[in-house]
Amino acid sequence: MTDACANTKGVDVKNGFNPAFFLAPLLVAVLAMPVRVSAADSMAVSQELDVALGYVGRATTLQNNLHVGPLSELNADVKYVVSPQLNKDLLLRVGAEWQRFSFWTPRAAATPDTLQQGNAILGLDHQLADQWLMRAEVQPGMYGDFSQLSWRSFDAPIVMGFVYLVDADLQWSFGLRVDVRSQYPVLPAVGVRWKFTDVWTLNLMLPNPRLEYDVKDKLQAYLGAGIMAGTYVVGDHFGDDRGLPQLNNATVDYTEVRLGPGLSWKVLPNLTLEAEMGYVLSRTWNFFDQHIDLSSKPVPFLQIACHARF
Amino acid sequence: MRRLLIFLMVGLCCAVSLKALAQGSDSLAGLKQFSDFSKIDITRLLEGEILTQRGPLMNFPNGISSQLCFAVPTSPAETAKRLQKWDPTRCKSLKVYVSHGLRDPCELKEFNSLYLYLDPGHRPIKWLLDQTLATSACNSELNLTQIEARELACCVGKDASPKTVGACWARLLFARASGFQRNGFASTLLYEFGEKSVNPASQLRSLLQEQVRITREFAPLLQRAGLVSGGAGISPLRPFYFWSLFEADHHATLTLGAVYELNLGDHYQLLNIEYYVSGTYYTSATLYEIWPIRDGGRTGSLVWRGDLFAAPLLRFTKGIERIASGAIMIQEIKKEVRCFQDSLKTP
C-alpha cells in the first residue's frame, strides 16, 4: 500500500480511501440492530450509536516549517455503547469505537496515510451526590497507522468527567483525559452548558463546544468548534519509506481544531442528524519524541453525523 | 409532701418530653415505613435542610419520580391549608404566570383573564400561540382530542391575537374542568395526537402502580379522590380546583388541577394532580404527608413530598440522561419547596 499512485490532478498520493471506510460504519449499525430491537422497550438498558463522516479539503502542509505539498483528509468515526443499569445510581458502559483519518498525503511528507483507532469502551456512570454525576471510562485498543498491528500500538486512555447540575438550564462539567503515551499525558478541561435565554444555549462542553440557537423544537442551528485528537504509533518501516528512519515506530500526537456553523435536526425523539461546515483552523502531526512537527494551513471542511439513543 | 411534689414535677416533665419524643418518633416511624428516607434529623430539617431521593427506574417508560422531605414552622393544619392556597406567581424563579382557583361548579368567566397573560413577545407564550394556530382537525403538537383540535382550529381561525386565542382556550379548559367536576377521573379525555392516544388518568394510575408502598400509605386518599379503585361506599373528597399557566421546558403550558386533602387526626395527606396539561408533558401528581414535630422549643410540621411525572420524551431518555433528568427534576422541585418555605415567613 505504499506504492505511489497519481490522481487526475497529478498530485502524488500514497494511499486511496479504503472501502472499509464506508463499510465499517454500516457494519456496526447493522450489528447494533438486533440489540436495538430486543432492548427497545427495556428502560434498564440504554444504547448509543454515533456515526460521523467528514471531509477536509486540500491544504498546504508544512513539515518543520517547510512546504511539503497539499493534503486532504477523509475521516470517519463509529461508536456504539450499551449501558445496562446496575443499580439506581450506577450504570455500566460497554462498547466499541472505530475512528479513522485517511490522508491523501504528499509523497515527501512525513504525514501518515492513515491514523486509526479500534478500541473497546469500558466504564461507569454514577450519581455521586444529589447534583453530581460522574463518568469514568477506559478505552483500551489499538492506536496506530495499522500498517502492521503489534502490541506497541496498544494504548488505554482514560477519560473521567464530572457534571454538576445546578438546574435545568445550567450545568458545569470538569473532565480529565489521561494518555500516558501522549506528549501531554494529562489534559484537564472545564465546560459549561448554560441555556441563557429561551432559544440560546452556550454549550461549552468539550470536545464540541457550541453556541446553539433553537430555530424550532426539532431544529437547532449552531456555531461550533470541534477538537479531534489522539496519540498513535506508526509502523516499523514508516520512517524508512519517507527517508526518515528515526520515525520508525514513532509516536505521533494528532490534533485537529475546527470551527464552523452547523444544523442539528431531531428527526425522531431518539435520532439526531447533524451537518456542519466551516474551517479546520489547525491540524498538527507532532512526532514529539523525534522533534518532527507537521501542520497544515486552514482549509474548509464538511461533516455529517448521526446520533441515535435507544 | 415536698418530695412528692418534686416526684410529680419530674414525672410531668418526663411525660411531656416522652410525648414530644413520641410525637417526633411517630412521625419518623410513619415516614420511614413508606418513604426512601432512612435517616432523618429533625433539627437539621427545621434549620432548612431539604432531603431528596431520586425515584428508581420505572417499568412505565413515560414515568419519573422523586421524594423530598422538609420541615416548616407551621402546624400541620396550617401547612396543609397553605400548600393548597399559596401563590407561586410571587416566586419568579418558578415561572408561573398565573394560578387561579375555580368554584365548583366552575363558570366560563373564571377563565376570562387568561388572554391577559398571553404576551406574544415572550418566547414560551409565542410557542403556545404558534402551536395553537398550527392546530388543525387532524394535526396538533398539543394534548387534545381530535374534536377539541377541530373546535380550537375553528375558533381561532387565522386570528392569532391573544384575546381570540385566550377565549378559545378558555372554552376548552372550561369544558374539561366542568367534565372533571361532574364525573372525576372517569371524564378525562384522551390526548389523541401522539404516537398513541394517551389518557392522563391512566398515566397517573400507571405511575402509582409502581409505587406500592406509597400507594398503600395513601390508599384512603387515593380511593376517596377516585384515582384508584376501592372507594365504593366511601364519601368522595371535595377537592380545591384550579387552572394555571406556567413555563415547562421553555414552553408556556396550561393545566387544570385539583388538590385533595384528607385529615387523619394529628396529620394530613394531600394529593395535587393535573388532570389536564396542554403540552410538553402528560400529567403529574404530587403527594404530601404532613405530621406535627417538635424539637426542643421549636414546633412545626414534617412534610414528605412525592412527585410523579409522566412525559412522552421520557420514553426515549435512558441511561445517564435519565438519571440526570431525575436529578434536575429534584433541583426544580427544591426551588418550589424553598419558595413555599419563604411564603410561610409572611402571614
Image (cartoon, helix red, strand yellow):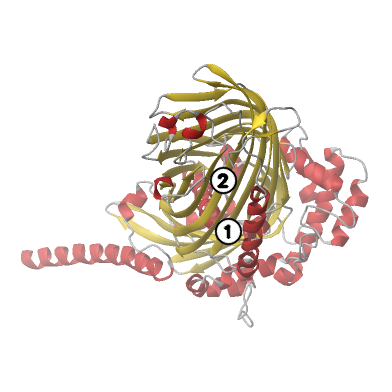
The chain carrying label 2 is A
Disc number placed over residue A47 in the picture, else none: 1
For label 2, count other residues whose C-alpha is less than 10 Å away and answer few (under 14), some (14-19) or many (20+).
many
Residue at the extreme bottom: B233
Q: Residue at x 76, y 31 (%)?
A: A8
Residue at image coords 52%, 29%:
A110
Q: Which residue is mark 2?
A: A99
Give left or right: position of A74 versus A209.
right
Asked if one can make out residue B113 in the rendered structure from this viewpoint, the answer is no
Distance between the Cα atoms at labels 1 and 2? 19 Å
Quarter of the image holding residue A193?
top right
Dot 1 amino acid type: Gln
Position of A309 with respect to B172 (left or right) is: left
B117 up-or-down from B84: above or below: above
Q: Residue at x 62, y 31 (%)?
A: A224
For the residue pair B253 and B250, the one nearer the viewer reads as B250
Three-letter code for the amino acid on which mark 2 is drawn: Gln
**Disc with the residue nearer the chain's start (1 vs 2):** 1
| Label 2: element kind | strand
Return the x and y of residue B110 as percentages of the image width and height: 76, 50
Q: Quadrant of the C terminus of chain A?
A: bottom right
A242 shown above or below B74:
above
Q: Nearer the viewer, residue B51 or B235?
A: B51
Q: What is the secondary structure assignment of the residue under circle 1?
A: strand
Position of A169 with respect to B180 (left or right) is left
Q: Nearer the viewer, residue B192 or B37?
A: B192
- Which part of the image, by quadrant, shows the N terminus of chain A? top right
Asked whether residue B316 appears in the rendered view, the answer is yes
Query: Residue B231 shows which numbered tag?
Result: none
